């Protein structure tokens, strides 16, 4: 049997193939090591003259490659057919819409906060997550011996003490414990009047539970000018929360409080009527913000005149607002990576 006859025979057998077992039989019949028809042709080449050996050898190798490719195509076709039969695809049925990604709930909340404050003429600025001791504590009226430092469980960064002595500096580095250091950075390089917010991640070395995490997000606010008062603060804060909790009846309560970098200091509580599940029963008061008038010592640290300028500062937790708005029970869910949680927003 010559090359052409083998090819014709193979193509005839190829049309009769119905399953993968048939394919394997055809492969052995033509390419098998022992009795394959094409294999026998290749083995007989040694008995032929050199010129004839080259001619038939080239044709045989070409046919071998063609047989292998056609068998592979047949395998793929049979597998696809089996899949189609197994799935019983209805070509008239609407297709499945592919799932697309979306923004994390905290990113969505941050965007809402940015948009609201931008609409009332606040600029949005960002600052470094690695801070130095001066900007994170000292310039904010929290010196080394201040008892308030105990409430900030700080992640201090390792440093080379010899290099610090050589550079004549003792300003240690840390992961910022709040976004307030950006107040100092901004006032060092800008002249009032201005109003800014600073969203960003902060870090605290503390045990995690349903309401505490080692890293979370804050939004710092600062407004400085010649005639800034608590009345301005009250209007802006109430305007923000009314827009953020749009559609809900909201009440406000301002309580005296203490923060080293403001004087006087206040805590802001809100009460949302729709949070109560019991008819005619008011919901509980929720603490949402710490704030106050900027302390004169903070102005002095940035070379501002505290007798000419006044200002207010505030800080709020982004996770806290998201938990209130969407009834999320545990702060750890935000960073769990659980798609069942993430896909709800």
Image: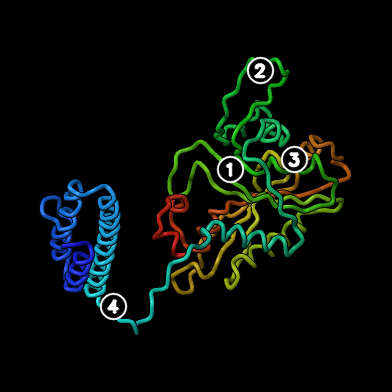
Locate residue 234, reporting x and y percent.
72, 59
Q: Residue furthest left?
A: 35
- Kindly identify which residue carries mark 2: 163
The N terminus appears in which quarter of the rendering?
bottom left
Task: Nearest to the eye among marks 2 and 3: give it.
Answer: 2
State which tag comes first along the sequence, 2 or 4. 4
Residues marked 2 and 3 touching at CB (< 8 Å): no
The residue that disc 1 covers is 202
Quarter where residue 229 is shown:
bottom right
Disc 4: which residue: 89
Q: Nearer the viewer, mark 2 or mark 4?
A: 4
Q: Quick check: 99 left or right of 11?
A: right
Q: Tell me which label, 2 or 1, sits earlier in the chain.
A: 2
Q: Is residue 189 above or below residue 12?
A: above
The x, y position of residue 101, in whole percent, is: 48, 62
Residue 261 or 112: which is nearer the viewer? 112
Q: What's the distance in space between the residues labelled 2 and 3, CA to CA?
A: 25 Å
Q: Earlier in the sequence, mark 2 or mark 3?
A: 2
Q: Which numbered disc flags the more N-terminal residue, 4 or 1? A: 4
Q: Which mark is in front, 2 or 1? A: 2
Which sits earlier in the primary sequence, circle 3 or circle 4? 4
Q: Nearer the viewer, residue 190 or 224?
A: 190
Q: Residue furthest bottom?
A: 92
**Distance of mark 3 from mark 1, alpha carbons?**
16 Å
**In this view, the mark in front (4 or 1):** 4
Q: CA distance from mark 4 to mark 1?
A: 52 Å
Q: Residue at x 80, y 49 (%)?
A: 224
Whether pointer 2 and pointer 4 mark residues with C-beta atoms closer than 8 Å, the reply is no
Q: Which of these two is toward me, 212 or 148? A: 212
Task: Determine whether 135 is above or below 166 in the image.
Answer: below
In front here: 89 or 259?
89
Labels 3 and 1: the sequence-earlier one: 3
């Amino acid at each position: 049997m010559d090359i052409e006859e083998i090819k014709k025979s193979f193509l005839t057998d190829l049309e009769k193939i119905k399953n993968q077992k048939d394919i394997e039989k055809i492969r052995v019949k033509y390419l098998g090591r022992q009795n394959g028809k094409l294999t026998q042709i290749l083995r007989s080449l040694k008995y032929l003259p050199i010129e004839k050996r080259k001619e038939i050898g080239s044709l045989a190798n070409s046919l071998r490659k063609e047989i292998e490719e056609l068998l592979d195509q047949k395998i793929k076709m049979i597998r696809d057919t089996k899949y189609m039969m197994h799935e019983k695809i209805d070509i008239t049925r609407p297709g499945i819409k592919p799932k697309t990604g979306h923004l994390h709930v905290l990113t969505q909340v941050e965007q809402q906060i940015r948009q609201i404050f931008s609409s009332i003429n606040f600029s949005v600025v960002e600052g470094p997550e690695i801070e130095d001791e001066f900007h994170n504590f000292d310039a904010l009226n929290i010196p080394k011996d201040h008892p308030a430092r105990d409430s900030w469980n700080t992640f201090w960064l390792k440093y080379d003490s010899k290099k610090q002595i050589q550079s004549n500096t003792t300003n240690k580095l840390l992961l910022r414990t709040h976004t307030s250091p950006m107040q100092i950075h901004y006032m060092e390089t800008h002249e009032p009047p201005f109003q800014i917010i600073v969203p960003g991640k902060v870090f605290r070395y503390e045990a995690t539970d349903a309401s505490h995490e080692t890293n979370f997000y804050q939004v710092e606010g600062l407004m400085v000018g010649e005639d800034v008062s608590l009345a301005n603060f009250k209007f802006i804060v109430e305007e923000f929360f009314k827009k953020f909790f749009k559609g809900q009846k909201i009440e406000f309560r301002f309580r005296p409080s203490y923060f080293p970098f403001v004087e006087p200091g206040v805590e802001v509580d809100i009460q949302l009527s729709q949070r109560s599940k019991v008819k005619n029963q008011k919901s509980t008061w929720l603490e949402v913000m710490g704030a106050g008038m900027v302390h004169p010592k903070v102005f002095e640290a940035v070379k501002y005149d505290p007798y000419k300028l006044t200002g207010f500062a505030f800080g709020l937790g982004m996770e806290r607002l998201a938990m209130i708005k969407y009834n999320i029970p545990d702060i750890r869910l935000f960073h769990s990576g659980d798609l069942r949680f993430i896909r709800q927003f």
